[in-house]
Amino acid sequence: MRHSKMRHSKAVPLLLSLLSGCSLIPTYQRPALPVAAQWPEAAGPTSSGPAGADIGWRNFYTDPALQGLIALSLANNRDLRVAVLDVAQAQAQYRLDRASLFPDVEASGEYEDTTTPADLSASGSTAHFQEYSLGVGAVSWEIDLFGKIRSQATAARESYLSDANTALSTQISLIAQVSSEYYTWLADRESLQIASSTVVAQQSSVRLTQMSASQGIDTALDVAQAQTTLYSAEASVAQYTRQVAQDMDELVLLAGASLPAPLLQQMNAVAGLEASPALPDVPAGLPSDLLERRPDVRAAEHTLLAANADVGAARAAFFPSISLTASGGTASSGLSNLFGAGQGSWLFEPSITVPIFTAGQNIANLDIAKIEKRIEIADYEKAIQSAFHDAADALNARGTYVAQVQAEQNLVDADNRYYQLATMRLNAGTDTYLDVYIAENALLNARLTLVSLKLAAQQNSITLYKVLGGGWQEASSPASAAP
């Protein structure tokens, strides 16, 4: 009896190990980083502080009007909504594939009432037969000895995680789009104000020049030059009026809903780019950080892991599959005897399927799985390279925009002095209107260029925050971690 117990104690773990099966999924090794370990020297020194991915979007975008726009878009944007639904669908698919690891257990109850006429009955008399049955059964449960089902479930899980990170990446991109479009709207409104003020000033200048020409002080050429500046400014007003309206249309599209009146009032209260709070500098970190902090890079790696699991499933197809069908219950010709002694019934039907000849299907499926894995490796490496390129470009531009904006501001100041001096000399009669005309056009173009450069600098800050993985969380916390 003791030896029998020992044999049973050894047999149970063996049986459990057989039922748990093995895995034929290749051991995963993350591909080597296909980019430099450091940012290019042109990117300049990187500041210290919280990583971009750990800065919540409310902490980065502190403009209340912009915060309202972002919140509205996160709640209503249709592209983001589809991305979230894709995650829910992938999660349901993972649960479906994982459920295949367990047997389907069904309960059934049957009642059968049969009457056979006398001329068809073996006894020569009418036969009446009743049968009652009640049972529980597991139908075609495949024992996952070689990990095929678990490999498929693993692939589904990785696909779900890939979709989850893709949804985060969609959110980050949406926030960046909304922010960029908001600052574009502010910049175009500011440019519209500059052009409109120039039109007002030039309308007065044209009237004065026409009056002077009628008195023989100025010439028709002076009038034509004054009108040229006016018409140029009026064309700019039409251009920026159109762009402001189109910017608002784009904001409504990104928000996925009409902008509420209080939000519009907040937006209209912001006078221009300078009135909006400045965006903070974002530390760059190391290129290797992008692997953990960029959702699109993580999504690509999860897709690679899914392809790796598919290789395991393709390998398992070369091995036998064992299925079990079992049922048990009770049956009787009378309902009162259904649970009586000796009325039990059971069925146990194991089956094994061994692939012998498949005309190369299993080999082809394995080749497809291996090639698909190589494709996903290339896509993963490309995602890293693209992330590195985007971040390096934004870092390279950060310092140069500061210098360029300052230089353009100096040019605006110089053109303004030139215009004032030209106007003074014209009023003193020492210069013609040509100098004023040149100064006016130079000042208008410089002011508009300064606005566009400030916008480009803001958008570069938005891009840097985005490409470093910022925007997946609403607000920063003391112990922020990657999602």
Image (tube, grey):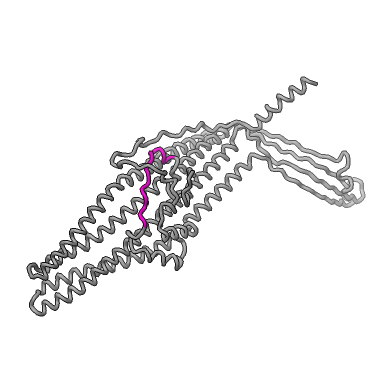
Total residue callouts: 0
Identity of the residue drawn at 11% across and 79% down:
214
Comparing 9 with 457, the one in front is 457
Examine the rendered structure and indicate whether residue 360 appears above or below residue 195.
above
* Main secondary structure type of the part rendered in magenta: loop
Q: Residue 354: percent from the left, percent from the top?
A: 62, 32
Q: Nearer the viewer, residue 143 or 478?
A: 478
- Tell me what residue is drawn at x 21 percent, y 74 percent: 203
Image: 114 above or below 14:
below
Give the magenta range. 277-291
Residue closer to the observer: 407 or 377: 407
Instruction: Kindly indicate the quadrant of the structure image that contains residue 147.
Output: top right
Find residue 330 and report its horizontal and vertical position in percent: 82, 42
Seen at 63% across and 43% down, the residue is 99
- The quadrant of the image that shows the N terminus is top right
Is 250 included in the stretch rendered in magenta? Answer: no
State the residue at coordinates (45%, 34%).
30
